[in-house]
Image: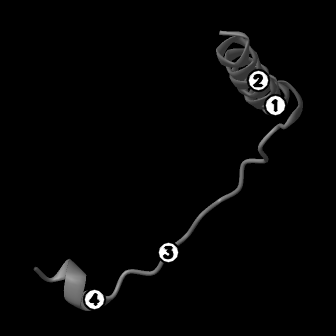
Amino acid sequence: MPSLFRFLVVLALIAGAIFAGMLALVAFVQPEPREISQTIPPQRLNK
């Protein structure tokens, strides 16, 4: 039983670290908006 408890604690710590990393990315990283232009071949427009 202690090894199962230790395993669950390690999984919870890993999940907490991943969750904290995602929260840090949301809080501290600001995406910069930019304009996107893409050329479309004339064959696709004539359908």
> Callout 2: 10 Å neighbours few (<14), some, many (20+)?
few
In terms of sequence position, does the residue under pointer 4 or pointer 2 come before the other?
A: 2
Kindly indicate the quadrant of the structure image that contains residue 19.
top right
Q: Depth check: give the residue in front, 45 or 27.
A: 27
Depth-wise, is mark 3 or mark 1 nearer the camera?
Answer: 1
Q: Which mark is residue 12?
A: none
Q: State the image coordinates of residue 47 (x, y, percent, origin top left).
A: 10, 79
Residue at the spot x=79%, y=47% of the render?
32
Callout 3: SS: loop
> Callout 3: 10 Å neighbours few (<14), some, many (20+)?
few
Q: Given contact means CB atoms under 8 Å apart, are the residues at marks 4 and 1 in contact?
A: no
Distance of label 3 from label 1 (alpha carbons):
34 Å
Q: Which residue is mark 2?
A: 10
Q: Amino acid at mark 1?
A: Gly
Residue at the spot x=45%, y=81% of the render?
39
Callout 1: SS: helix
Q: Amino acid at mark 4?
A: Pro
Up/down of 43 relative to 45, above or below: below
Q: Amino acid at mark 3?
A: Gln
Q: Quadrant of the N terminus?
A: top right
Q: Which residue is mark 4?
A: 42
Residue at the spot x=81%, y=23% of the render?
20
Depth-wise, is mark 4 or mark 2 nearer the camera?
Answer: 2
In terms of sequence position, does the residue under pointer 4 or pointer 1 come before the other?
A: 1
Q: Given contact means CB atoms under 8 Å apart, are the residues at marks 2 and 3 in contact?
A: no
Q: State the image coordinates of residue 30 (x, y, percent, origin top left).
A: 82, 37
Q: Which residue is mark 3?
A: 38
